[in-house]
Amino acid sequence: MAGRNFLFVPGPTNIPDRVTRSMVIAMEDHRSSKFPELTRTLFPDLKRVFGCAEGQVFIFPSSGTGAWEAALANTLSPGDRVLAPRFGQFSHLWIDMMQRLGLDVQVIEVEWGEGAPEDKIGEMLRADNAHRIKGVMVVHNETATGVASDIGAVRRAMDESRHPALLYVDGVSSIASMDFRMTEWRVDLAVAGSQKGLMLPAGLGIVCASEKALAATKTAKCARVFFDFADMQRANVDGYFPYTPSLPLLYGLRTSLDMLFEEGLEQVYARHHRLAAGVREAVGAWGLATCCRHPRWYSDTVTAVMVPEGINGAHVVDVAFRRYNLALGAGLSKVAGKLFRIGHLGDLNEMMLLGALAGTEMAMADVGIGIEFGSGVGAAQDYWRRTDPVPKRRVAHSEVVYASHSTGSINA
Ligand code: PLP
């Protein structure tokens, strides 16, 4: 199909051309004396993105799932009790991994569309007088439902119950796109992947561990080899890895971090926040609801749109892809067919999203959802014009200087 594919799944995200170019490199010796010049910059800069002032960051050649496993296996022992709310496919999969690693998981079942229940977490921790619960695991941004939990509130609930459990947070679809304050929230293990806010291909699983988490590795008995923090620590201290790292991904990471800092992390978060709000305006104008049940949990990186009774959300996704070259996210497991998802994270702006919203309107109409063309697009346009955070971008027409003459030298 001619033209670009419009990639609006909530990861992998669009890779900026500058990042792509920086990954086209000749292979080099990852044991050379020069290699640490690259890697030594990555560790502190990644910690900035995690909002982490202490502890250590680990870069594994894996996807986010590997980073989940690294966080668990390095800090827990088989039979350890952990507490985890389940409110979407990713919290479900993480719980499934915990069970398969032999952990004793106390699952808090939550309606899909709601966030982590900090009150319930606090209540269960208070009831655990013997402090058998070793960890609380929360998915910050549940990509399946477009729900962002309040990690600061989870931390407060843990503090109020005076419980020493470690706090594990999956930030795979939030870190580098949404405000994340690892040290302030005293998150002990935070997990990210390269293919979302970091605007890279999949292939890096990143874990940031607090000092308390690093101390827990000394007694943790879960088996780990490839994901062993200790092996990483021994090599990373000199800027190396215990095995062959993906050089293109590390060079790409250098560029994506540069781009995030050039824009400014605060601006990156504000941009995601504003783009997400515009998408929700569009959904409201279509007369549809989001899966997210309350504004306090609105996600800035993905919106899950409920489809009307009798319509299959997967049909919208398929038609959008086949007819309009637009990739939307499908509903997963429990919400399969009931919704479709618009990913709005990474390297994107209003114009790109307007294309996605226009294509979504066409696909929805094609499958029989009665919407007025332009209603969502118009609502988003209106919102983004009203809320432009960079007033200097608005230039009065009389001030516009552009090449209005077709003759003469541009340098004249
Ligand atoms: N956690 C969340 C919140 C995710 O969105 C995903 C993937 O989309 C994962 C974990 C798993 O990451 P990966 O697919 O990179 O293994």
Image (cartoon, rainbow, N blue to C red):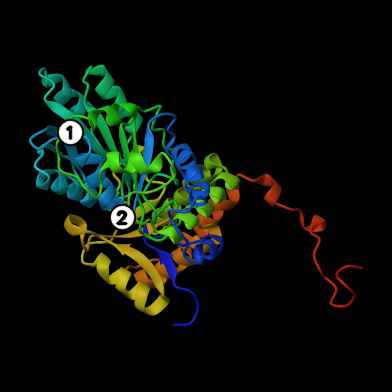
In the image, residue 168 sits, relative to residue 225, either above or below, namely above
Viewer-side residue, 166 vs 76: 76
Number of the front mark, 2 or 1: 1
Question: Residue placed farthest to the bottom in the image?
Answer: 1
* First reached walking from the N terminus: tag 2 or tag 1: 2
- In the rendered image, residue 49, in percent from the top left (x then y), is placed at 46, 40
Is the residue 404 above or below the residue 248 in the image? below
Near mark 1 (Cα within 10 A), the count class, few <14, some 14-19 or many ≥20, is some
Task: Say which quadrant the N terminus sits in.
Answer: bottom left
Identify the residue at image location x=21%, y=26%.
165
Q: Secondary structure at mark 1?
A: loop
Judge by depth and name the residue closer to the eye, 115 or 363.
115
Which of the image's four quarters has the C terminus? bottom right
**Residue 123's mark?**
none
Residue at (18, 37) in percent of width and height: 84
The residue tagged 2 is 63
**Residue positioned 82% across, 57% down in the render:** 398
> Residue 339: horizontal and vertical position, in percent?
27, 59
| Residue 113 appears in the picture as rendered | no
Q: Position of residue 103 (x, y in %)?
A: 10, 39
Q: CA distance from mark 2 to mark 1?
A: 23 Å
User: Would the CB of label 2 be found within 8 Å of ligand 1?
Assistant: yes
Residue 348, given in percent of the width and then of the height, sits at 51, 58
In the image, residue 316 sits, relative to residue 164, either above or below, namely: below
Disc 2 on helix, strand or loop? loop
Count of numbered circles on the image: 2
In the foreground, 72 or 345: 72
**Label 2 Cα crowd, 10 Å radius (few <14 / some 14-19 / many 20+):** some
Residue displayed at 85% across by 73% down: 405
Label 1, on which residue?
220
When the figure is inspected, residue 120 is found, relative to residue 178, above or below; the finding is above
